Amino acid sequence: MEKLLKTAVWLSKLTGVRGDYILHFGVCFLSTSIIGILSFLVVNLLLGYTPALVASLFGAVFATGLSIGKEAGDENNPASGWSWWDLVADGFGIVTGLLVLAILIVMLF
């Protein structure tokens, strides 16, 4: 976890983007990609085929739930609050994860 935070700080200094946004992007990108790949493989094993769109939607819905849940928690935290910019960073992470997932599915399967 410490390395992840150091990487976010380094990327923040490099790009000028706030470190929190980089973490939001990264978490949503990884959760979309990983859940999408896992759902593709599991459903493919069970059914013998998987539409790539279904796998992508599983990952995107999971990441969307994470991002909205985190912001709802922030809304109830007196030291923080709801941030639309966090959701924008989450959205960029989800879209990037979907693009990478689509490329991986097309190239590998």
Image: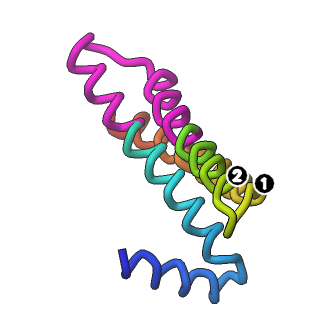
Quadrant showing the C terminus: top left
Camera-nearest residue between 92 and 68: 68
**Can you tell which mark lies on residue 87?**
2
Asked if the stretch drawn in magenta spans residue 45, the answer is: yes
For image coordinates 52% across by 28% down, the residue present is 57
Q: What residue type is labelled 1?
A: Trp
> Left of 82 or right of it: where is 19?
left
As measured in the structure, the alpha-carbon distance from the residue carrying label 2 to the one carrying label 1 is 5 Å
Q: Residue at x 26, y 25 (%)?
A: 42
Callout 2 crowding tier (Cα within 10 Å): few <14, some 14–19, many ≥20? many
Is 68 in front, or is 30?
A: 68
For the image shown, how many numbered marks are present on the structure?
A: 2
Q: What element carries label 2?
A: helix
Of all residues, the one furthest to the top in this rendering is 47
Residue occupying the point 42% across, 75% down: 4
Q: Which of 104 and 45 is in front in this view?
A: 45
Where residue 29 sits: x, y (%)?
52, 52
Percent position (x, y) of residue 39?
Answer: 35, 29
Secondary structure beneath disc 1?
A: helix
Circles 2 and 1: CB atoms closer than 8 Å: yes
Q: Is residue 5 above or below residue 41?
A: below
Quadrant of res 82: bottom right
Amino acid type for the residue under numbered disc 2: Leu
Q: Name the residue under label 1.
A: 84
Residue at 49% over, 57% down: 27
Residue 99 lies, in percent from the top left, at 56, 44
Other-residue count near label 1 (Cα within 10 Å), few / some / many at <14 / 14–19 / ≥20: few
Q: Residue most toward the right?
A: 84
In the depicted structure, whether residue 64 falls above or below residue 75? above
Q: Magenta segment range?
A: 36-64
